[in-house]
Image: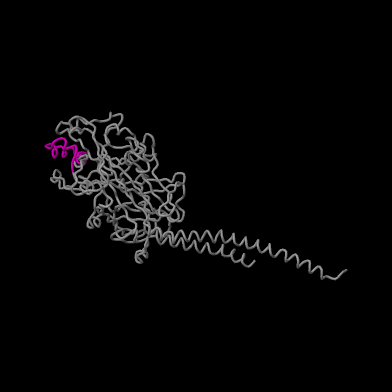
């Protein structure tokens, strides 16, 4: 009986103690407090400085190299694309100028300037990859970017070049990704900024602040964006020449800054199986919901993760999904329009190989293979107890809108022979340029730490909560099984000793 009582009490007391310890440990990993910075906790270091982190992030890039630019310009031939890659880079983040203010709504923040840079990784790249000297041909982004800001300047700066060099340009992978000095733009004292600029420390410190909720006041806010580049509204610079800044999107809701960077979500089962999460995607200047459909799971390093993905509906044009009208998705299914956030150059983000996209563009290009869902979809593997993303495959393809360009000052049109869809189908030829994959997986060391902490604690919690009660019940039944005959015999003995009436 005493054994049953002990295990019953343990099943009540110990689970709450263990659960408190688990929650405390999770919060140490998730909460970005000032004390966490001073103590240099693992959670803080994993977020604030990834240079020495055990689990690393890698960006892999494949370019769609155009192999027949002359035929495209002169004969109206289909562009023949040869996929070249991957060129692999380690991605590092290091928070600078960190402080801990309080938001207007009274919650604690961590404010910082994010230094993000890339370092070429030959071991993950294809054999012989040379990101400095390889030459790749894609649309001439310097001309197109200038045309949509000032067709007058575009005409006078590029009119003396051969038409094929206006349409296409040939540069090294690092130039296309991180920027280069364009000789034609030198008169404007401008450089081509690149698709994903590789920041120097001075550039990082010179940018505006980001701010996210620490989660100290409310863990459900943990690492949610409060301010991006100095603003709580999603702003962009649609005309770089005039340096105009205004909200990116058509509605207040669309311009709302919300979501985490995707590496961490709210802990302690605030994230639900079958639910959805919100990520802030700085490449697209917008929030993006991802969904755990049908409770789909995967296993990485022995840890069960729930897979969150982008639904097909999020990629539909406004005609098929009216919610996307606020993001100016008035073209084809399968593309996010980021033209205004990227400076007026018609830019459209899809999933690689046009997964879930209108297949029309396959009719106007050769060499791009059809998509394979598992290889080309966006996917995050999230551990629900902690809200940590322990496996990520963030994949996106960059396509540029091409069409014949008319110049009223020169009374001329460039690229007249370009093979185009009819206007009812599409206003642009969505020209693929490159696709990228951000890879991040928990390392074996971090997985071992996780399993010896959270998993072990959760196992002990379940054992003492349910196992303790089961043992108490078994002990109670055993006691009754043994004691009941003894009690019966004792009762008969006492009756036998009673005097006869």
Residue 74 in the image: state x and y as whole percent.
17, 31
**Which quadrant holds the C terminus?**
bottom right
Find out whether residue 157 is within the magenta segment: yes
Indicate the quadrant where residue 431 lies: top left
Specify the farthest residue to the left. Answer: 160
Is 9 displayed left or right of 499 in the figure?
left
Question: Looking at the image, which residue is at 41% across and 62% down?
Answer: 28
Residue 203's place in the image compared with 79, above or below, is: below
Q: Position of residue 377 (x, y in %)?
A: 36, 43
Q: Is residue 299 magenta?
A: no
Camera-side residue: 278 or 125? 125
Q: Find residue 334 and report its horizontal and vertical position in percent.
A: 34, 38
The image's colouring method is one colour
Front-most of residues 195 and 295? 295
> Can you tell which quarter of the image residue 422 is in?
top left
- Give the quadrant of the N terminus: bottom right
- Asked if residue 430 is positioned above or below residue 205 in the image, the reply reads above
- The foreground one among 15 and 459 is 459
Query: Is the magenta region chiefly helix, strand or loop?
Result: helix
Vertical placement of residue 479 versus 175, above or below: below
**Segment tinted magenta in the rendering:** 143-170
Residue drawn at point x = 42 percent, y = 45 percent = 291
| Residue visible at 31% across and 37% down in the picture | 369
Q: How many marks?
A: 0
């Amino acid at each position: 009986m005493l054994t049953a009582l002990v295990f019953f009490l343990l099943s009540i007391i110990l689970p709450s103690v263990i659960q408190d310890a688990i929650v405390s440990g999770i919060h140490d990993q998730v909460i970005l407090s000032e004390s966490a910075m001073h103590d240099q906790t693992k959670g803080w270091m994993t977020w604030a400085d990834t240079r020495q982190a055990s689990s690393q992030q890698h960006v892999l890039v494949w370019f769609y190299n155009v192999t027949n630019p002359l035929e495209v310009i002169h004969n109206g031939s289909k562009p023949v694309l040869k996929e070249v890659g991957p060129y692999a880079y380690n991605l590092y983040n290091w928070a600078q100028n960190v402080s801990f203010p309080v938001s207007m709504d009274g919650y604690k923040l961590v404010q910082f300037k994010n230094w993000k840079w890339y370092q070429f990784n030959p071991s993950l790249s294809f054999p012989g990859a040379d990101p400095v000297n390889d030459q790749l041909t894609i649309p001439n982004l310097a001309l197109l970017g200038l045309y949509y800001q000032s067709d007058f300047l575009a005409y006078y700066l590029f009119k003396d070049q051969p038409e094929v060099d206006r349409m296409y340009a040939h540069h090294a992978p690092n130039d296309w990704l991180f920027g280069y000095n364009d000789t034609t733009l030198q008169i404007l004292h401008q450089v081509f900024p690149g698709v994903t600029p590789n920041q120097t420390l001075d550039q990082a410190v010179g940018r505006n602040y980001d701010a996210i909720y620490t989660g100290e006041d409310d863990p459900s806010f943990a690492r949610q964006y409060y301010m991006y580049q100095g603003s709580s509204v999603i702003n962009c610079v649609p005309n770089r020449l005039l340096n105009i800044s205004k909200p990116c999107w058509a509605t207040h809701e669309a311009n709302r800054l919300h979501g985490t960077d995707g590496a961490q979500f709210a802990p302690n089962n605030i994230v639900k199986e079958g639910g959805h999460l919100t990520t802030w995607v700085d490449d697209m200047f917008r929030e993006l919901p991802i969904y755990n459909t049908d409770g789909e799971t995967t296993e990485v390093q022995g840890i069960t993760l729930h897979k969150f993905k982008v639904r097909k509906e999020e990629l539909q044009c406004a005609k098929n999904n009216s919610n996307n009208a606020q993001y100016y998705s008035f073209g084809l299914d399968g593309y996010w329009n980021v033209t205004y956030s990227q400076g007026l150059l018609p830019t459209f983000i899809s999933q690689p190989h046009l997964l879930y996209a209108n297949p029309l563009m396959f009719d106007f290009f050769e060499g791009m293979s059809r998509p394979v869902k598992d290889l080309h979809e966006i996917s995050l593997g999230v551990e629900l107890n902690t809200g940590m993303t322990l496996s990520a495959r963030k994949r996106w393809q960059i396509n540029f809108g091409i069409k014949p360009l008319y110049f009223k000052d020169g009374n001329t049109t460039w690229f007249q022979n370009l093979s185009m869809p009819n206007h009812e189908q599409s206003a642009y030829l969505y020209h693929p340029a490159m696709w990228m994959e951000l890879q991040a997986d928990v390392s074996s060391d971090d997985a071992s730490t996780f399993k010896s902490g959270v998993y072990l604690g959760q196992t002990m919690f379940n054992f003492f909560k349910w196992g303790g009660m089961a043992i108490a019940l078994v002990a109670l039944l055993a006691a009754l099984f043994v004691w009941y005959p003894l009690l019966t015999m004792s009762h008969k003995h006492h009756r036998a000793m009673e005097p006869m009436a």
